[in-house]
Amino acid sequence: MMPEASTAEMSAPAPDHVSRVDQVGVEERVARFRTRSIKKSSKVHALKLVLSQIDLTTLEGQDTPGKVRQLCQKAKHLHDTLPDIPHVAAVCVYPMMVGVAKKALTDSGIHIASVATAFPSGMATTEAKLEEIKLAVEEGADEIDMVISRGKFLQGEYQAVFDEIALCKEACGDAHLKVILETGELGTLDRVRHASDLAMHAGADFIKTSTGKIQPAATMPVTLVMLQAIRDYYYKTDRMVGMKPAGGISKAKLAIQYLVMLRETLGEAWMTPEWFRFGASSLANDVLMQLKKQETGVYQSGDYFSKD
Amino acid sequence: MDKNIKTEAHYAERASAQETSMPATSESQSKSKSRTTSASAPRLGVEKTYKLYINGKFPRTESGRYFTVADASGNNVANMCRASRKDFREAVVAARGAFSGWSRASAYLRSQILYRVAEMLEGRGEQFVGELTATGSSKRAAAQEVTAAIDCLVYYAGWADKYQQIFSSVNPVASSHFNFSILEPTGVVSAIAPQEKGLLGFVSDIAPIIAGGNTVVSLASEQNPLCAISFAEVLHSSDVPPGVVNILSGYRNELNEHFASHMDVNAVIYNGADADEIKLVQEQAANNIKRVVIRKKPAAPDPYQIMDCQETKTTWHPIGG
């Protein structure tokens, strides 16, 4: 660790020291999760849980109010011919679209998440970022997904990153704050662990892997490291922090493997939409197809499921 | 054991023959001859593992199961992968993935690739004659079958860039519009190959499907699957994109249902005359109203077999608009 690290953390209410990550151990552990066999009724249960944990996302420059309304409709009516399926946890949009989503989702119980803080790069002044958060919250966002300043983090300005997260948390008010680490830009699992600790100590309600705009996005090793950070933080402070892997999880099978990892790392308390989310746009349809397959015994086709 | 010796005999013949054309391989293969040629350095034959062909790769079945193929006198010739419904599912995903590229490839390119497949098969004819004779064909019949399969490929290679103009039309309408009916490939086709003629039956089943721009998942003959699996090696070396042809070996009574019921399959072709199987295929195919083609008897190649997996799209275009 660079010398700045220790000084930064001493002045911030941050971890005393950052745990080093055993990369080989993490990969071996992840390989184990991937071998678990989840079938039949357990699979149906898991698939429904996945659905209820999805943040249905559209974060494109080409988004229009019409597109957002369509996504909200999808969130409310995933596939009406399937009985007993939950709705998704939230719809995730840009701040400009929060008002549209709010109107479309009235009384549905579906949360509205908004990215903010110059998503996805985070390249803006702190003032501008706080302004954006306040705007999104005023418009009606229940959850704010912020990005950390990866540039500053990589330069070793941990205190600045910490302070910014703390200010954002304050600006959120009652809204939940999810902190996006953009692990694809952090480079090593050690830095992922460090950034996770930093974000949690600064007040994050959720930590999130990625924006979905950078490859690699969410991977199982990265998510495991973050889950372990959440576990250690919980043991230390008794505060539960949520986890949101985002980007690149588009298959139901993979999502179930994430749930296995969650169950075996943090335990059952985290197995709810309140503490675990999937940031995804195409995952929902694959899960629906699997549920339909379980119901009918027939392999399904995307042709018969609504597009987001 | 028996197969090894035959393989050696092939090598011996190939080395000694001045001109190795296919009929030459149907000359006598004696065990004594192969023993004499390998007497100096006795070795165990290297037997081929017959695997599946999915998305341009040769995986084993995920189920880990196998079944055996016997020759006329009941000896085990090879262990074949007994594909499961999950292997079929993977193959359909591969075929779906390959569809957009293959259906958009120019007719000329598809034609050239099919011709290339024929060239590759011509070059490896001996291997297929060997496999056919190993499972009961006479050498003469085997040689004829291989020749017919090559000719069949060339035939459909020729049709690949011609059937559109023959079967499309400009239709007279009572307004100032051009009205065209043009053909589009149906999509992903699952094909249950005939039980007879392990090579020719298989080739004449898939060639019109892919000539028409569809992608295919095929179930090789249960009784004689060797050639279909070896044919994957021919396809693999002929610029056929991965996923365009996927080949499974296994039991019909396990796989028919899934071949017919999968919602992401747009047409199913069943070769055979078993009334119960036909009923099952028709019923299961009704799920997504997929196109069903039943071929009770082997037919000579004709362009109408391409048309079995084509959809007609009619468009109106204002004249001078």
Image: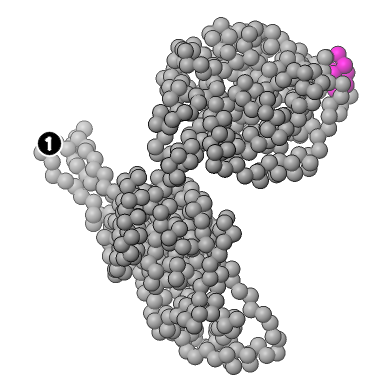
| Three-letter residue code for mark 1 | Ser
Residue A222 in the figure: left or right of residue B134: right
Residue in the image at 32% along x and 51% along y? B283
In this view, the residue in front, A263 or A204, is A263
Quarter the N terminus of chain A occupies = top right
In this view, the residue in front, B101 or A300, is A300
Q: What element carries label 1?
A: loop
Residue in the image at 57% along x and 56% along y? B63
Residue under pointer 1: B175
In this view, the residue in front, B186 or A75, is A75
Dividing the picture into quadrants, the one containing residue B300 is: bottom left
Residue in the image at 70% along x and 21% along y? A241
Residue A215 in the figure: left or right of residue A63: right
Q: Give the range drawn in magenta.
A: A4-12
Residue in the image at 29% along x and 68% along y? B297
Residue B101 visible? The answer is no
Q: Given the current orientation, which residue lies at the most extreme front position?
A: A41
Type of colouring:
one colour
Residue B273 visible? The answer is yes
How dense is the environment of label 1, judged by Cα within 10 Å: few (below 14), some, or many (20 and up)? few
